């Protein structure tokens, strides 16, 4: 019986370690999942660069205005959606993406369009 007492003690210690280790791994896994949902500056820069690239001619013709628009839009998206929510959205059809994302950055787009129109009017008045 005496020898078995040590065996029971060792099994109890081993089980406690297993439980503790399992909890630690669970917490680490949870932290990793949470980190996947958090935006970082690198994400922001990638989104802005993609936005500028996707604006095609306007990105070149109105570089500063496009940069402002992309900054505004990406800031809005990043403040309203987690990274994983955004990834889910961009996996949807273009129509679904527009339905979900447009209300988030509509104000940025409206301001961008106004500034482009004003810039076009200024160019016309300088040419006349």
Image (cartoon, grey):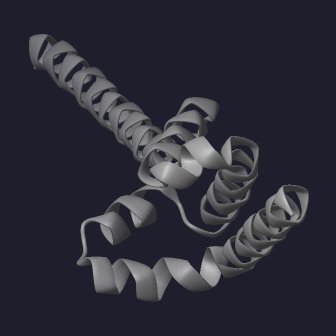
> Which quadrant does the C terminus fall into?
bottom right
Asked whether residue 39 appears in the rendered view, the answer is no
Q: 107 or 112, which lies in front?
A: 112
Quick check: 74 above or below 12? below
**Image location of residue 18, percent across then percent down:** 26, 29
Asked whether residue 93 appears in the rendered view, the answer is yes
Tell me which corner region of the image, top left, top right, bottom left or bottom right, holds residue 8. Answer: top left
Quick check: 100 above or below 54? below
Q: 49 or 62, which lies in front?
A: 62
Viewed as shown, does residue 49 lie left or right of 121?
left
Q: Which residue is drawn at 62% across and 55% down?
A: 74
Tell me which corner region of the image, top left, top right, bottom left or bottom right, holds residue 13. Answer: top left
Q: 98 or 57, which lies in front?
A: 57
> Which quadrant does the N terminus fall into?
top left
Viewed as shown, does residue 6 lie left or right of 64?
left
**Count of picture labels:** 0
**Image location of residue 60, percent across then percent down:** 57, 42
Q: Residue at x 73, y 58 (%)?
A: 72
Q: 7 or 13, which lies in front?
A: 13
Quick check: 48 above or below 16? below
**Image location of residue 122, percent across then percent down:** 88, 62
Q: Residue at x 79, y 75 (%)?
A: 114
Viewed as shown, does residue 69 lie left or right of 123?
left
């Amino acid at each position: 019986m005496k020898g078995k007492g040590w065996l029971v003690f060792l099994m109890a210690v081993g089980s406690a370690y297993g439980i503790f280790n399992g909890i630690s791994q669970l917490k680490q896994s949870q932290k990793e999942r949470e980190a996947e949902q958090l935006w970082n500056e690198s994400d922001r820069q990638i989104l802005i660069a993609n936005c500028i690239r996707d604006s095609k001619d306007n990105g070149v013709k109105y570089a500063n205005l496009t940069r402002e628009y992309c900054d505004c839009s990406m800031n809005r998206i990043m403040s309203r959606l987690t990274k994983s929510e955004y990834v889910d959205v961009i996996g949807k059809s273009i129509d679904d993406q527009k339905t979900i994302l447009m209300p988030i950055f509509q104000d940025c787009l409206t301001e961008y369009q106004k500034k482009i129109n004003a810039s076009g009017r200024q160019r016309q008045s300088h040419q006349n």
